[in-house]
Image (tube, rainbow, N blue to C red):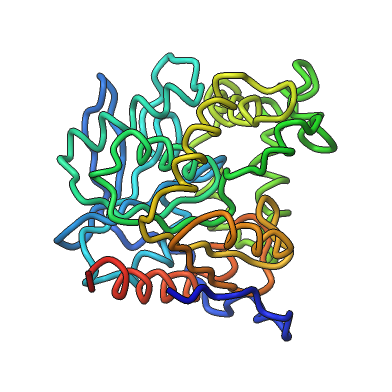
Amino acid sequence: MAQERPPQHERPAPPSATISDEFPFESHYVEVLGSKMHYVDEGEGDPILFLHGNPTSSYLWRNVIPHLKGSGRLIAPDLIGMGKSDKPDIPYRFEDHARYLDAFIEKLGLKNITLVVHDWGSGLGFHYAVRHPDNIAGIAFMEALLPFPEQFERHPFGMFAMLRDPVKGKKAVMEDNVFVEKILPMSVKRKLTETEMNAYRAPFPTVQSRLPVYVWPQEVPFDDGPEDIKDMIRNYTAWFEKSDMPKLLIYGDPGAIIPPGNIERFIERFPHLETHFVGVASHFLQEDHPHNIGRAIWDWHRREIKGK
C-alpha cells in the first residue's frame, strides 16, 4: 500500500471554527473489579474503542465520535479514577489502569476492536493489543507513546523535571491542579471555553482526587523512569514494528510527543501505516481539529477495516 508522506508544509489548516462544548451522549456505567466505570456507548456492530489519557476523559472525544456514526459500536470509557468513573483506593500506576481496562473490555464482551488512542490511552491500547492481537482489527493513534530507542536515555527536562519532583511536582499537580488549569489549555491552540474547562475540572475537585493525574507523569519512560514501563513499551513497540495490522497516525504541527519531523521515521519503522496531517495543533489535537480527525478515522476505517 502506498503510504502518505508528510506534506511539504503548505499553509496548515487553522483549528476548527465550530467545536461544541456539549457532551451529547447518554452515560453508561459498568461494575469493574468492584468499582463503576463510566463510558459512552453509541451504535451497533464491531466496536471502535476510544481511549483518552491524562488529564482528560471521554469528553475529549465528544466532537470526534459523531463522525463515526454508522461505522460500528462507538465506546469511550473514562479510565479508572478519571472522568465520571469511580476513584478506588489504588496506586493508579499504569498496571492498575491496564487491569481495569482489560476487565472493562472483558465485561462488555468486546470483540474485533478498532482502537482509537491518545496520550497514555495509546500505551494502554498498545499494551492490550500486543497481548490480544487476535482481538484487534486496527489502531488509529495520535500523540502516542511510541518512543525511539534514544528517547529512553533522555533525562527529564523542563516541565517534566518539575512534575517528577516529589515536593514541587506533587504540590503543582495535587494542590494547584496545574495539569488541568495550565498544561491542558496551553496544549490547545484555541481558547477552551469555560464550559469545556469545567468539564475537565469536574473529575478532580479535591487534592486526593488528583492522585491519578499526579502518578501518570511519574510513569514517563525517561532515563530515570520505571523499568517495568520501559520494558512494556519496548515490548509493544517491537510487536508494532512487525505487525501488518492497519495503522493510522494522525499528527499536527508542531505537535508535542510526535512532531512532523519524526513522521518519516514512523513510516519507515511501522508497516501498513497511513499518516494524516490535521494542521496547527499541539498535544490535544481533538480540541483543535475534531472534525478533521473524525473524518480521517471514518475514511480509514471504511477502507481498511470494514472494507476487508
292 horizontally vs 298: left or right = right
Relative to 40, say whether 203 is above or below: above
Q: Tell me what residue is drawn at x 59 percent, y 27 percent.
A: 230
Foreground: 304 or 100? 304
Residue 247 image point, x, y percent: 43, 60
Relative to 76, say whether 129 is above or below: above
Residue 133 image point, x, y percent: 30, 42
Q: Residue furthest right?
A: 158
Q: Tell me what residue is drawn at x 69 percent, y 71 percent.
A: 280
Relative to 89, say whether 246 is above or below: below
Foreground: 111 or 59? 111
Q: Residue furthest bottom?
A: 10
210 horizontally vs 23: left or right = right
Foreground: 282 or 2? 2
Q: Quick one: quadrant of the N terminus?
A: bottom left
Foreground: 74 or 141? 141
Q: Quadrant of residue 191?
A: bottom right
Relative to 183, say whether 233 is above or below: above
